[in-house]
Image: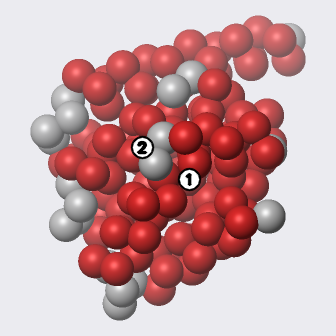
């Protein structure tokens, strides 16, 4: 039963990432996708690792780059990245290799008055530094 649920979650994750890739220009799709990835990554270390394994880090970064002015995309995107970075050294490596540090710095600079982005971005950068 646990294996079936995990397999279903992975399939749902792949479908979500596919939808985000297919509709990159649609801010609302990217916002909801980032929210869903943040929520899923927040369910536990294994889920956060699966986000990284499935290509979620690059998908998040692309959404954040495309909609850099949207705090509604950035806040859940940064929260998802923080949760992935906290999961493991391997996840942190994926984030660094995808130029996540530069994106986090850009987002934090552009949205310097958003406390959620600053908090989650700082926590993510701290995890990457360890």
Q: Is residue 22 above or below residue 80?
A: above
Q: Is 89 left, or right, of 51 in this rendering?
A: right
**Is residue 40 at all visible to an observer of this figure?**
no
Residue at 49% x, 18% y: name it: 14
What residue did someone put label 1 on? 81
- Under circle 2, the secondary element is helix
Residue at the image position 59 percent from the left and 76 percent from the top: 122
Decide which of 17, 6 is in the foreground and name it.
Answer: 17
Residue 127 numbered tag: none
Rendered position, 70 above or below 93: below
Quarter of the image that includes the C terminus: bottom right
Q: Is 24 on the left or on the right of 99, as rendered?
A: left
Residue displayed at 85% across by 17% down: 2
- Label 1, residues with CA under 10 Å away: few <14, some 14-19, many ≥20: many
Residue 46 is situated, as x and y percent measured from the top left of the image, at 79, 34
Image position, residue 102 (x, y; %): 42, 60
């Amino acid at each position: 039963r646990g294996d079936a649920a995990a397999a279903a979650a992975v399939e749902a994750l792949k479908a979500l990432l596919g939808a985000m890739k297919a509709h990159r220009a649609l801010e609302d799709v990217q916002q909801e996708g980032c929210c869903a990835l943040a929520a899923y990554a927040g369910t536990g270390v294994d889920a956060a690792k699966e986000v990284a394994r499935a290509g979620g880090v690059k998908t998040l970064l692309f959404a954040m780059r495309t909609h850099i002015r949207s705090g509604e995309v950035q806040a859940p995107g940064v929260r998802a990245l923080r949760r992935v970075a906290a999961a493991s050294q391997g996840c942190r490596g994926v984030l660094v290799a995808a130029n996540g540090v530069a994106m986090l710095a850009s987002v934090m600079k552009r949205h310097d008055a958003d406390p959620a982005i600053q908090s989650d971005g700082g926590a993510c950068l701290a995890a990457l530094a360890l």
